[in-house]
Image (cartoon, coloured by chain):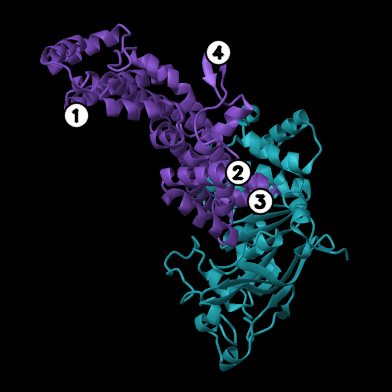
Amino acid sequence: MLGYTIKRLLQMVLVLFVVSIIVFLMMSFTGDPVFMVIPIDSTQAEIEQARRLLGLDQSLFSQYWIFLSNLLQGDFGRSYVFRQPAMDLILERLPATIEMVLVAMAFATVIAIPLGVYAGANPNRTASRGIMAGSLFGISLPGFWVGMMLIYFFSVRHPLLPSSGRGETIEILGLRLSIFTADGWSHILLPAVTLALATLAIILRITRAGMMEVMRQDYIRFARAKGASRTHILFAHGLKNALIPVVTIFGLQLGDLIAFATITETIFAWPGTGKLLIDSIYRGDRPVIVVYLMLTAFIFVVINFLVDIVYTVIDPRITVK
Amino acid sequence: MAEPLLDLRELQTHFQTFGGLVKAVDGVSFNVKAGEIVGLVGESGGGKSVIGFSILGLVDPPGRIAGGEIRFDGRDISKLGEREMRNVRGRDIAMVFQDPMTSLNPVYTIGRQMDEVLRLHTNLDEAARRIRCIRMLEDVGISGAESRLDAYPHQFSGGMRQRVVIAIALLAGSRLIIADEPTTALDVTVQSQILKLMRRQVQETGAAMILITHDLAVVSEMADRVVVLYCGKVVERGLTEEVIRSPAHPYTRGLLDSIPRITDRQRRLRQIPGTVPDIRTLGAGCSFRGRCAHAQPLCAERSPELAPVRGSLDAACHFPLQETL
């Protein structure tokens, strides 16, 4: 277990290194960032000075070298726009994104798994066919459209819920969170539902497919022959065996939503990292983008690691080496 | 005479398929007395397993019990609701499945899977349940039982798993064990161990057993009585000794002839010609006539009824065999 953890940590360093190179190279093709930070009427001398200040007058290789050596000293670079450390900018917004994503994932899982189990255990019932047809909507409807429709119905036509912002937050352990206030909940609901919809549909379909496979197995019949109740057979004997692909998808979706909730955050003006990313791309704020994408890679590696651990908890036949 | 423990009367289990109605079990009657082992014999597709599942009420749609009675201990359990049936399963009647590699749930320890039966059907506390599980594992010949409780199925060999399955079946003190091809998936050396174990357990607990198998050799070793099935119907039944020594139905004879014997090695092994017919297109007459060497015009016209032939033997044949093997 310890050896496995060390191996994964080394893997992570490698992944982050490669990501930093790719992002650095990509950013050099997207135009000269200096024009994003200077006033339109700047003189040539002012432009040159800005370039020197930002270190953009040096070769790409030496820029990367400076970035890397600073990184090893814990300095992730400063935003061109805000003149603040890029990491601070991201970490400040991360709690907002993570709490929205966690609410969305919880919402998706709590609904998807029972429906998936039902549809998988009774594939021929009308209700199951209805669930599956509904899940197709969840997969195919684009998030931005769903978000706008939710705003239209719940904020405009019937002003029940606010359409933007985080609402009232309270600080817990240095993190500003909305989920502990009623106002915060009213703000988080619509974006979380928007974000949850596609994930809900995917988890539902994966759960159903797994359950259909598992319910044919002999051990399900054997459990029935023991006199176990239907619910116990479905959830204790069936679901646990169908859970491996569900956990895999759950992990991927979790990472995906944390990293790229951009569209939903933009629609609901949710002050999270996704909105920061899109703003930084508009402004050519390279340090923020680099750190953001490295952080994203880091989150994915961590989630994958956790998913591997969860596998071993679910299925004793799987061991980590 | 006391009423038998299990009494099947004209059981009908049908499956509605796209190709038509399949009468997998078509008017089967036999009984099992307490403490008795009854062998249920026939080729694949003969409806043997379906009878087992019918008794436990585990026939899934498109299948259904279309008629007849399953009297267990004097009451017809085929009419019970799901909730009442759950109390019968595992407590009154237990089942052992064919493939021990797949009948245990891979993600739970065997201790937990054993405990489940006791939790469902007894009021014992946790410590008492644990002791009973350990004792039962020892009874079925698993050494180091206490530490094995925390092992997972994949840590056991096939034979050991089948011992665990048998332990689970016997755990709640069921009065009837339905063993569906319990040794078919096992090595020959392990087979006889498991069979001996099952016979001993049945004798010790006084439970009855229905032994479902395609292997007449197994039946001749184990069973007190034999019921031979063909195309969902009973074609012959009687005391094992008489059925083996002088079968009255040509099908039983065919099954016996296809068992290899070490004494006649020069003779080619005889087999029953042809295959089991499509059960949906049987029509009138005896369903075995197409493969029967003794078939007469009458066999195509009228389906033979199960009738006493001699001694304990009942056979469904217009021209029952007379010779002794």
Asked if the residue at tag 4 contacts the one at tag 1, i.e. Cβ–Cβ closer than 8 Å, the answer is no
Asked if the residue at tag 3 contacts the one at tag 2, i.e. Cβ–Cβ closer than 8 Å, the answer is no
Q: Nearer the viewer, residue A159 or A66?
A: A159
In the rendered image of the structure, the colour used to display chain B is cyan
**Of circles 2 and 1, which is in front?**
1
Q: Which residue is mark 4?
A: A173
Q: Kindly report the distance in space between the C-alpha atoms of the residues bearing marks 2 and 1.
A: 54 Å
In the rendered image of the structure, the colour used to display chain A is purple
Quick one: label 4, few (<14), some, or many (20+) residues within 10 Å? few
Q: Kindly report the distance in space between the C-alpha atoms of the residues bearing marks 4 and 2.
A: 40 Å
Q: Position of residue A46 (x, y in %)?
A: 15, 12
Q: Nearer the viewer, residue B114 or A56?
A: A56
Amino acid type, mark 4: Leu
Badge 4 and badge 2 in a common chain:
yes
The chain holding disc 1 is A
Q: Which mark is residue A276?
A: none
Q: Which residue is mark 1?
A: A30
Which quadrant of the rendered structure holds the C terminus of chain A? top left
Q: Is residue A64 above or below residue B143?
A: above
Q: Which residue is mark 2?
A: A237
Amino acid type, mark 3: Arg
Q: Which residue is mark 3?
A: A224
Q: Position of residue B37 (x, y in %)?
A: 71, 58
> Does label 2 or label 1 sit earlier along the sequence?
1
Badge 1 and badge 4 in a common chain:
yes
Quick one: label 1, few (<14), some, or many (20+) residues within 10 Å? few
Which quadrant of the rendered structure holds the N terminus of chain A? top left
